[in-house]
Amino acid sequence: TLVSALRVAWRAAILGANVLIRGEAGAGKRALAQYLNRASQKWELLKNRSVDEEESASRRFVAINPASFAPSIFANELFGFQPKSASGLASLLSVIESRSLMRVGARKPLDLEVRFLGATSADDESLQDQVRPQFLERISAGGTIWIPPLRERKEDIPLLAKQFLRAREERRTQTLTEDTLEVLQDHEWPGNVRELRAVVLDAVGRFPDVDYIVPEQCS
C-alpha cells in the first residue's frame, strides 16, 4: 500500500541511505522521492539542533534524467565538474558508494553530503538487461520502495483528486461532487496518478466558472 511505501521512505530518510523507487509510469515516484528528501530534512533538524531550517532546506532535491545526457557529459551535469576517473560509469559507481569524488588535478577527495535516489518503471527483466548489477546494488543499498499502481489503492483517489483541484483554485472554490468521486474511483487509471491529475485539471480548465464539477465534465 501507499502507507507502507511512506513508512519505508521515512525509515530510509532516517538512515540516510540510497534508495531505489519502483512503480509503473505515472504512479508517483518523483513525488515519493521529494517526500523522502523533505523527511530527511525534518529528521536532520530533530537529530541535530545546531542545523537551522534554512541550512537544512538548502539541501535541495535535484532530479536528473540520465537518458537525456550523453555519457561523456553526464558526470559533469551530475557533479558540476568532471571527476578524475576516466570512465563515467566508474566515477558514478565510486561516488555513489563513497559519497566523495576526486576533481581533475586534485590531491585528495571531496566529501559530499548527498543521497542518491533512483526511480524506474522497468520490470525485473528489463531492469536486469539494461542496468549493471553494480549500479543496482549501490543505488538500492538502503532498500527498494515499491509504489502500488493507482488501481490497487483506489481509496487514495478522492484525496488526490481534491488535492489537484485545490492546487489549481484561483478566484473561486470548486468542488468535486460525490458522484464525480465515485466515477473517478471506478476508473482503472492505466496512466496512474499522472492521468488522474490530467483529468482533474482538464475539467477545471474547461469549466472554470462552475462551483461543482460533475461526472460528465471529467470524461
Image (tube, rainbow, N blue to C red):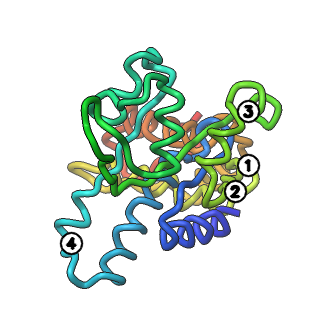
Q: Does label 3 or label 4 sit earlier along the sequence?
A: 4
Q: Residue 151, labelled with which disc?
A: 1
Mark 4 or mark 2: which is in front? 4
> According to the image, label 4 marks what residue?
53
From the viewer's side, name the closer residue of 37 and 134: 134
Q: CA distance from mark 2 to mark 3?
A: 27 Å
> According to the image, label 2 marks what residue?
154
Q: Does label 1 or label 3 sit earlier along the sequence?
A: 3
Which three-letter amino acid code belongs to the residue tagged 4?
Glu
What SS does tag 2 mark? Answer: helix
Residue in view at x 29 percent, y 35 percent: 103
Q: Does label 4 or label 2 sit earlier along the sequence?
A: 4
What SS does tag 4 mark? Answer: helix
**In this rendering, would 4 be left or right of 199?**
right
In the image, residue 2 lies at what x, y percent?
Answer: 64, 62
From this view, report whether residue 64 is shown above or below residue 32: above
What SS does tag 3 mark? Answer: helix
In the image, residue 89 lies at what x, y percent?
Answer: 53, 28
> According to the image, label 3 marks what residue?
127
